[in-house]
Image: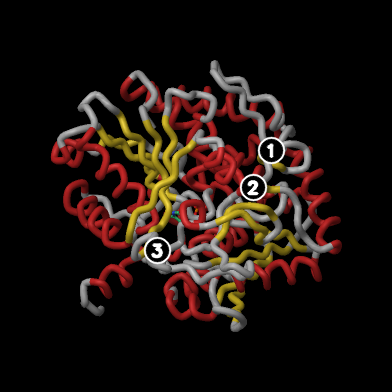
Amino acid sequence: MPYELQTGYQTLLESAKQRHSRGPQALSYESVIMYNLPDERGHFGPYGGIFVSETLLHALSELRDAYGTYRQNSEFVEEYERELKHFVGRPSPIYHAKRWSKLLGGAQIYLKREDLNHTGSHKINNVIGQALLARRMGKQRVIAETGAGQHGVATATIAARLSMECVVYMGAADVHRQAANVYRMKLLGATVVPINSGSRTLKDALNEAMRDWVSNVENTFYIIGTVAGPHPYPMMVRNFQCVIGDECRMQMIELVGRQPDAVIACVGGGSNAMGIFYPYINDTSVQLIGVEAAGDGIGTCRHASSLIGGSPGILHGNRTYLLQDKNGQIINTHSISAGLDYPGIGPEHAWLHDTRRAQYVGIRDDETLKAFHDCCHIEGIIPALESSHALAYAAKIAPNLGQDKLLLVNLSGRGDKDMHTVAERAGITF
Ligand SMILES: *Cc1c(COP(=O)(O)O)cnc(C)c1O
């Protein structure tokens, strides 16, 4: 690690430590707005909150208390930061996509390289935080739900690292589609449970994980993979992912001497986006842009754009925007990227959308694939299909902006897991 970056990282640790110890109510950037959500009960305006059965209330209040205690515990925070540095490989660099920017002929595109993290995406940042918390709470068993398998792999990885029992729930359709990740989890010692109910995908796995948690709450910690679920999950996951944006604020100064004009991130549940948005939230000169999966197009019924195409309702323990029919039944979603294929979105995004602090746009499958291939050819980086949505939007707006404008894109993960999907689209089998 270059000396300067290391110095920057020390300052970063300080600022992260301060955030952890000051609690959610006291962010103080030199700012125009003072954003301090959620409130005590987990509300982001009318969104968020706790909508669960009585049996889970106790587990959630135990979690809230434990997180409230340990986020201020310097030993805990230091252990978390140590794992991020030595096990994950943080800080992840910011890379100037010079050739691509030049070819597009407008704004300069910078990539935050979460794809270089151990296990290949940003998910590990949050999983390590929750697993360390689980251990402090005396829970020996962790459970998780997974769609594409990335969150499952990250959870199985940290469970192996900390010698914990690990059970991962996965829709049977996804088990079939994501065979390599299923095998990875098994290699790491996890038990993968295929779910055959409903559409046999992520939302069914989520229901099953909740059921497991209710029955085994004494010794079990439920590691949720995104900024969704009942309070305190959206806040806690966001805070663990904030390491992304905290690093960016340091690194942009080191690299170019100023913050970007816009930060762009793909949004499934919304954790990589919240992690890079949040440290910029009070800095209103920085535009925040979330990119949803528009599938075949928002006008078709085959997409996964909960904010642009959905309406408020209650899903998985919180109030947020979701894709539902007239009777409140969840609509089946579609996206080329399994990681964005979720009918809801984190409640904080719902609030940022309504208040216009962030803008949300849709990118279709075909636009995503073009950006995926361009990034491979031009920059020598194979991006995840999820992240390719954010890349596609940056490539779409860059030509219309001046060459002095800076776009910072969160490259949330690497594309190794997507080889089969991309090859299939090209009519290739291997
Ligand atoms: C899971 C995943 C996402 C979507 O999840 P968010 O919570 O919206 O960040 C995005 N990118 C990658 C690489 C993922 O694995």
Amino acid found under the numbered disc labelled 3: Ser
**Residue depicted at x 54% and y 25%:** 282
The residue beneath circle 3 is 337
| Residue labelled 3 has its Cβ within 8 Å of some atom of ligand 1 | yes
Residue 400 placed where, x, y %?
22, 35
Q: Quadrant of the N terminus?
A: top left
Query: In this view of the protein, which residue sits in the foreground, 153 or 413?
Result: 413
- Which label sits in the foreground, 1 or 2? 1
- Which label sits in the foreground, 1 or 3? 1
Q: In the orientation shown, which residue stands out farthest toward the top?
A: 30
Q: Secondary structure at mark 3?
A: loop
| Residue labelled 1 has its Cβ within 8 Å of some atom of ligand 1 | no
The residue beneath circle 1 is 38
The quarter of the picture where residue 145 lies is bottom right
Query: In this view of the protein, which residue sits in the foreground, 5 or 266?
Result: 266
Mark drawn on residue 234: 2
Q: In this rendering, is residue 203 above or below 35?
A: below
Query: In this view of the protein, which residue sits in the foreground, 288 or 120?
Result: 288
Residue 297 placed where, x, y %?
35, 61
Q: In this rendering, is residue 418 above or below 258?
A: below
- Callout 3 environment at 10 Å: few (<14), some (14 to 19), or many (20+)? many
- Callout 1 environment at 10 Å: few (<14), some (14 to 19), or many (20+)? many
Q: Classify residue 90 as left or right of residue 135.
A: left
Marks 1 and 2: CB-CB under 8 Å? yes
Amino acid found under the numbered disc labelled 1: Pro
Q: Quadrant of the C terminus?
A: bottom left
Residue 309 placed where, x, y %?
47, 57
